[in-house]
Image (cartoon, rainbow, N blue to C red):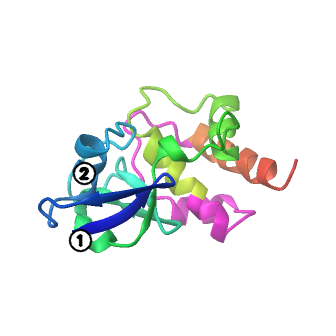
Amino acid sequence: MVQLTVNGESREFSGDEEMPLLWYLREDAGLKGVKFGCGIAQCGACTVHIDGQAIRSCVTPVAAVDGASITTIEGLSDGETLHPVQQAWIEEDVAQCGYCQAGQIMAVAAMLEETPNPSDDDIDRNLTNICRCGTYYRLRKAVHRAASLKRGG
């Protein structure tokens, strides 16, 4: 039996512990914000936070998160108050098709915890999620805006 916390709620899982966390989150927990993209940890559409770290859930077995705290895009905001990255995404109109955006936001939120005032080079080096629509210019602007919002600006 795997015990974990998802978006602040304690849960137990007694199924196939080798099942990717992605499928547990989508199918068992009903959290559809986490997306399947490639299934090989390359695109980042499935990015969630595991104990605060951005992790690709498509290749993470449920067994690996026993006792962990998982945050998905649905749990990133504080009630009605958006996370600074979510707010910046709206203000900079980042999303085009939107499919990758939850994973992008989760990756950025984790990066800003480690690098609170990133340069363009920091962003390019640390964010490896793929956007098929190519909204990287707006994404970079949103990262800078989110960093400013987190600092109270």
Question: Disc 2 marks which amino acid?
Answer: Tyr
First in sequence: mark 1 or mark 2?
2
Q: Residues within 10 Å of mark 2 (few under 14, many from 20)?
A: many
Taking the image as shown, residue 43 lies to the left or right of residue 150, namely left
Residue shown at 38% from the left, 34% from the top = 99
* Outermost right residue: 153
Q: Is residue 118 magenta?
A: yes
Coordinates of residue 50 in the picture (x, y in percent) = 44, 65
* Outermost left residue: 16
Coordinates of residue 88 in the picture (x, y in percent) = 69, 39
Dot 2 corresponds to which residue? 24
In terms of secondary structure, where does tag 1 sit?
A: helix
Taking the image as shown, residue 62 lies to the left or right of residue 48, namely left
- Give the label on residue 150, or none: none
Q: As rendered, which of 67 and 86 lies closer to the eye?
A: 67
- Please indicate, yes or no, whether residue 121 appears anywhere in the rendered image: no
Q: Which residues are magenta?
A: 110-136
- Please indicate, yes or no, whether residue 106 appears anywhere in the rendered image: yes
* Number of numbered labels in the structure image: 2
Which quadrant of the view contains residue 128? bottom left
Q: Residues within 10 Å of mark 1 (few under 14, many from 20)?
A: some
Dot 1 corresponds to which residue? 63
In terms of secondary structure, where does tag 2 sit?
A: helix
Coordinates of residue 136 in the picture (x, y in percent) = 53, 43
Residue shown at 27% from the left, 58% from the top = 21
Q: As rendered, which of 15 and 96 lies closer to the eye?
A: 15
Taking the image as shown, residue 110 lies to the left or right of residue 104, namely right
Question: Disc 1 marks which amino acid?
Answer: Ala
Residue shown at 68% from the left, 36% from the top = 87
Q: As rendered, which of 42 and 103 lies closer to the eye?
A: 103
Distance between the alpha carbons at the discs numbered 1 and 2: 11 Å
Q: Is residue 5 magenta?
A: no
